[in-house]
Image: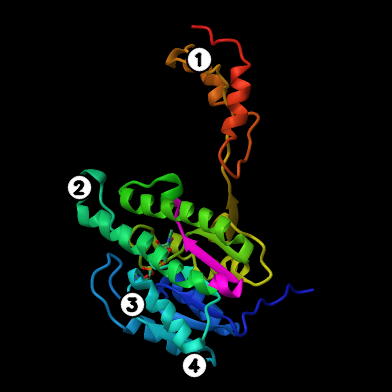
Amino acid sequence: MAPPELRYDGQTVVVTGAGGGLGREYAVFFGSRGANVVVNDLGGSFKGEGKGSQAADAVVNKIRSVGGKAVANYDSVENGEAIIKTAIDNFGRIDVLINNAGILRDVSFKNMRQQDWDLIYKVHVKGAYKCARAAWPYFRKQKYGRLISTASAAGLFGSFGQTNYSAAKLALVGFTETLAKEGLKYNILCNVIAPIAASRMTETVMPPDVLSNLKPTWVVPLVAVLTHKDSTETGSIYEAGGGHIAKLRYERSKGALLKTDDSLTPGAIIAKWKDVANFSEPEHPQGPANAMELLEAAQQLPPSPT
Ligand code: NAD
């Protein structure tokens, strides 16, 4: 039996940065599955320069040409209120927010200018915050919401020439983890994806044969699953691209426990370093180690040898 076709009839989906790349494919998908779509795009360059209405309009026309419902919004994600207002004014509700808009200002750390750092933070972090902040009261009131934010392998693992982008992208992981906790009792599910796909962002750094195996449409199904009403997933991080979909989690070593007295010195830690970095009995934590429990156990230990 074929798996069910996921639908979003009557729901309103806001996709930021939907004028091209991944965002366009999300918007077109939701438009084809019964949703009302707000196609937001500032319409500037991949470095965050300029603006225009053409990119968003073209996607709205594409959705409408096959009978879908969509409206354009040309605000920067820094003006999240205006984007969510477009959803409310046109469709009366917001059910799904996909924080997708993004730019790059790649430069080695040595040569980074303040504006390269600030602009990346403004678009990725402030933009995601402003859009989510504006959607949140609606999500809470209706006890329903689905939020996706877009991280990156660069944020999770680091990437040469991308300190600004890496920091901003990992910020969205912490942002989403906390929103997942705050949203849970209101059925607001929040997840992060680290996609990989051919787009104007990646076409300058990847060769054509690699790009041809990274169609943005192959990232869409994961976003569809995570934002569907039947999903129960929240607070998770996923990689998606080139047909590979995987979930990531933290791993904590068993660690060393040292007596909490004057014997807890740098030398005592060096002596136990094998335990600190031993992953043979790992935990997969959902939160910080229980400090009080560990402190009590540490107090029972004999002093560390000096
Ligand atoms: P893209 O450049 O094709 O799409 C980004 C869109 O965001 C553009 O249409 C752009 O006009 C829009 N945008 C930029 N600044 C905006 C702003 N201030 N307000 C509103 N819209 C704005 O790139 P893409 O590859 O489709 O990237 C989509 C998202 O995925 C980004 O957040 C990017 O960082 C992330 N990402 C992409 C990849 C990849 O392999 N393509 C990898 C990791 C993360």
**How far across and how far down the image is residue 143, in percent?**
61, 71
> Which comes sooner in the sequence, label 3 or label 2?
3
* Residue ID for mark 3: 75
Q: Is residue 27 left or right of residue 19?
A: right
Residue 245, located in which quarter of the rendered image? bottom right
> Which comes sooner in the sequence, label 4 or label 1?
4
Residue 226, located in which quarter of the rendered image? bottom right
Q: Quadrant of ligand 1?
A: bottom left
Q: Is residue 278 left or right of residue 83?
A: right
* Residue ID for mark 1: 261
Q: Is 147 within the magenta?
A: yes
Give, as a single range, the part of the protein colored magenta: 139-153
Note whether ligand 1 is within 8 Å of mark 3. yes
* Residue ID for mark 4: 65
Q: Secondary structure at mark 2?
A: helix
* Residue ID for mark 2: 111
* Amino acid type of the residue that numbered disc 2 sits on in the rendered structure: Asn
* Amino acid type of the residue that numbered disc 4 sits on in the rendered structure: Ser
Residue 253, located in which quarter of the rendered image? top right
